[in-house]
Amino acid sequence: MEKTFHIVTFGCQMNVNDSDWLARALVSRGWRQAPEEEAWLFVVNTCSVRDKPEQKVYSELGRLDLHRKAKPGLTAAVGGCVAQQIGRGFFERFPFVRLVFGSDGIAGAPDAADQLAEDPSARIALLNFEAEYPERDTLLRAMPKTTVPAALTPAFDADAGEPEAGPAQAFVNIMQGCDNFCAYCIVPYTRGRQKSRQPEAVLEECRTRVEQGAREITLLGQNVNSYGLDPSRGGSRDGVGFAELLRQVAAIPGLLRLRFTTSHPKDIDPAVIRAFGELENLCPSLHLPLQAGSDEVLRRMGRKYDRARYLGIVEALRAARPDIALTTDLIVGFPGETEEDFQATLDMMERVRFESSFSFRYSDRPGVAAVRMTPKISDEVGQDRLLRLQSLQNIITKESLKTLEGQETDVLLEAMSRKQDGGEPFWRGRDGGGRVVNVRVSGGLEGGVPLAGRMLRVRLVEAKNHSLLGDKVGLPW
């Protein structure tokens, strides 16, 4: 039997990174990444932060159940947060699922996949949380650059519709888990308590990714601002906090852009804020989840900051980097949210002028504190508030993008754009603020240089609803 696999990824950038690593690991062991119809092992990497992405997992497995009737022997693995949450229950509900692994268990998933191929009766569950971050980056050092596939996440489903990373972009985990236990959030239960990686391990992986062609790196964690401050260690890891880690990564030769996500407002260090004005390759963009604009709702959520604290952070960020692009997460319909509370959220949106936001209706997640909170907000009221919030966001986004018309910026090109008008082709990329820019170019090559992964000077000529159109100014580099 040829060992073939296909991965579908739901959820956040950390899941995208996990899927990328797993694909690299399997390829290094002789597996072949294949289209769905050719794959023997089908891996579903899952998200349970809300009910909707969890239900998508069951729908996907149900579809595979029908598909395997035409392809006997098809085997499935379920990883990520839903796997951690449901565990061995997948074996009972879907008999063709033979491997489940959580966020810590993924380090053992390549060995487990080999076992499945050798033993048709094997069923393996990798669900234990580890006390330390389970390092797995040695694979990257062992693989020659020419054998590292450029794009190893063949399918990615995020509710926000984020484009996949281009060949010159890399995600690097710096930590795992979370200790905040916000009242609505299942992450501490599915990804475990906070565990930070050793600084040198992070730096070594970043250096390796740059050597392999990455020009932009995004550092990932549930709360990167608390990197190194693991309670079990009583202080920063090796004396290196997040601000210092940022500076060390930014100093890697050849790294043109540096980003990070996600940041909890309660933990942001003034040194991190200053870094936006001091580090040339730290992109002027920050995702800073607000969640709600009402102090009372924030208190019930257990967020440990209020409106005044959040607005003070925004003021300091814009003082350090006036052109910084701020994005956020927002929840409507949290238990007990009044219309006055919701209006406070709209007011904060107007004050901060987020360029975009990921917004959702609250949904109960098993085991979290908010499950027991009342009164619950009806679906009708929650949906009405979500639509009103998103309508305001669309207006703010369009107005923010409109102010950029006529400016020049550098765009890191990712791939051919979905937007094509039959004339000159368009390529999609992102500017330093993380905005999507569709650029008119004359052909797929410029001077014999492939465009994917190249930087291009662009004049922004038109703002669309959620993106920008631009014309190239110079040659790619």
Image: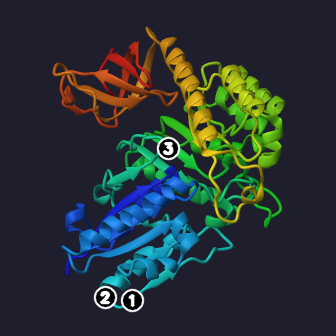
Q: Residues within 10 Å of mark 3 (few under 14, many from 20)?
A: many
At a point 69% along the width and 37% down the height, the residue shown is: 290
Q: What sort of colour scheme is used for the picture?
A: rainbow
Number of marks in picture? 3
Q: Earlier in the sequence, mark 2 or mark 3?
A: 2
Quadrant where the C terminus is found in the figure? top left
At a point 40% along the width and 77% down the height, the residue shown is 94
Calculate the distance from the C-alpha at mark 2 to the C-alpha at mark 3: 37 Å
Labels 1 & 2 near each other (Cβ < 8 A): yes
Q: Secondary structure at mark 3?
A: strand
Residue, disc 3: 217
**Numbered mark located on residue 118 in the image:** 2
Frontmost residue, 214 versus 399? 399
Tell me the amino acid under the disc marked 1.
Ala
- Label ID, residue 122: 1
Query: Quick one: quadrant of the N terminus?
Result: bottom left
Residue lying furthest top = 406
* Label 2 secondary element: helix
